[in-house]
Amino acid sequence: MSDTAAPAESHPAKTSRTEDDAPYAATGRTTPTRSKERASYDPAVVHPILDGAYLCHLGFVRDGAPVVLPTLYARVGRRLYIHGSTGSRPLRMANTTDPGLPVCLTVTHVDGLVLARSAFHHSINYRSVVAHGVAYTVTDPDERRIALDAIVDQVVAGRSQDSRPANEKELAATAVIRLDLDEVSAKLRTGGPNDDPDDLALPFWSGVVPVARTYGAPVPSEDLDPSIPVPEYLAAR
Amino acid sequence: MSDTAAPAESHPAKTSRTEDDAPYAATGRTTPTRSKERASYDPAVVHPILDGAYLCHLGFVRDGAPVVLPTLYARVGRRLYIHGSTGSRPLRMANTTDPGLPVCLTVTHVDGLVLARSAFHHSINYRSVVAHGVAYTVTDPDERRIALDAIVDQVVAGRSQDSRPANEKELAATAVIRLDLDEVSAKLRTGGPNDDPDDLALPFWSGVVPVARTYGAPVPSEDLDPSIPVPEYLAAR
């Protein structure tokens, strides 16, 4: 474990740096090779994409080969947190690799299916964020609690304050890693198909099928005391 | 380019090997370190998860670091195909790396938010597939056409036959890579929260919020001939 994993001077308060609207710096690996006009480094674009999801795909390298696993995450200011069992591979690797585990964390929303007259111009409308960097194990107890609350609240805002906090045994079984947002970019596609002018008279339907993630009515556990109502923070979904 | 990229004897017919129900072999990297009971190597589990999506997260290694990009894909039998601009990084790397580009291709469906009485037991219900292997550039023209049709049909079944096929110029600008399904596994979580017995009397709501991907009414392009109706294959969504 590197001593830099959780520097004492940088415990994030919930609101720390969220006011910071300086754009992220473009680097070689956050500059797309094509469709450059779809890329953004603006926190006002990047952060809402991250805040609107809770599942990311985390990439890391194991024995020289890539591994991509779906996992929950949370954003706190310009930091992302991931948690998991202390036995899980990436969390264990982040803890035993000096100076940390190189990762790529990607979040994608699908907003529409784009059907062009030509097969070639078919596409999807999407919003994605790709963050590169080194993930460090978080050891500071305060930062760990902030991260664990944030991961619960990322899925259902307000839920961390309406559930039993982790006890010592659970905390001991849980690893938390942090990726500082630094080398990060968003990429978006919106709008209708980009049909070639020569294709406009073809007899094929053209347009967009909107896609959304929707939430059904909450289903209580069978053993739930029926006097406990569905919480307001769930009804809001 | 390796000569093995598109061996002439193995052009896939649309139905080739889909009847093959032999389980995939478990390997070190497809055996989870925990929750082993959630893993499956059965094509009857793996294939429907792949067939129910069209966006994957593709991981590869560039300059020693992981990269994870969202991209469309298609399954044809025990093969996955990805396409893209010949200039895009992973497709270019697959073409210039001998014997191909090591990748990890991951597909995830979110089915529910699982709210336990304890923060620790919060989870999500999901179905995911993780496929490891080496991706090869497909050079055989017939296999390329099969793959490109399949990628369009993966998004909207039947659409490849109701749009203009790629012309020579478009084909020249498009790279196709193939990942043979071999080292692949599914992982699933279903059901309600696994609350600790000691927590059952706590006054917190517990249960599942169902999650689904939904499709809105198709929105025609502004320049679409109004006499062209919404196709049946779209109405079915």
Image (cartoon, coloured by chain):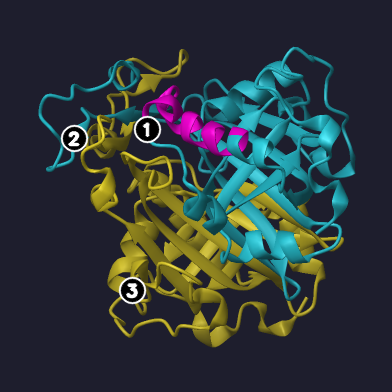
Chain colours: A cyan, B yellow
Which label sits on residue A189?
none
**Disc 1 secondary structure class:** loop
Q: Which residue is mark 3?
A: B43
Quarter of the figure with the C terminus of chain A = top left
Q: Give residue B146's position: percent from left, percent from top.
A: 48, 63
**In which quadrant is the N terminus of chain A drawn?**
bottom right
Discs 2, 3: same chain: no
Q: Earlier in the sequence, mark 1 or mark 2?
A: 1
What is the span of residues highlighted in magenta in the rendered image?
A: A146-163
Q: Which residue is identified by label 2?
A: A219
What amino acid does circle 1 point to? Ser
Left or right, B56 with respect to B227, comes to: right
Three-letter code for the amino acid on which mark 2 is drawn: Val
**Residue A137 falls inside the magenta stretch:** no
Classed neighbour count for the residue bearing mark 2: other residues with Cα under 10 Å, few (<14), some (14–19), many (≥20): some
Residue under numbered circle 1: A163
> Which residue: 29% across, 81% down?
B21
Residue B165 seen in this snapshot: yes
Measured Cα–Cα span from mark 1 to mark 2? 17 Å
* Tag in front: 1 or 2: 1
* Marks 1,3: beta carbons within 8 A: no
- Which residue is at a point 28% across and 79% down the rendered structure image? B19
- Quarter assignment of residue B235: top left
Residue B132 drawn at (x, y percent): 58, 71
Q: Chain of mark 3?
A: B
Q: Nearer the viewer, residue B78 or B42?
A: B42
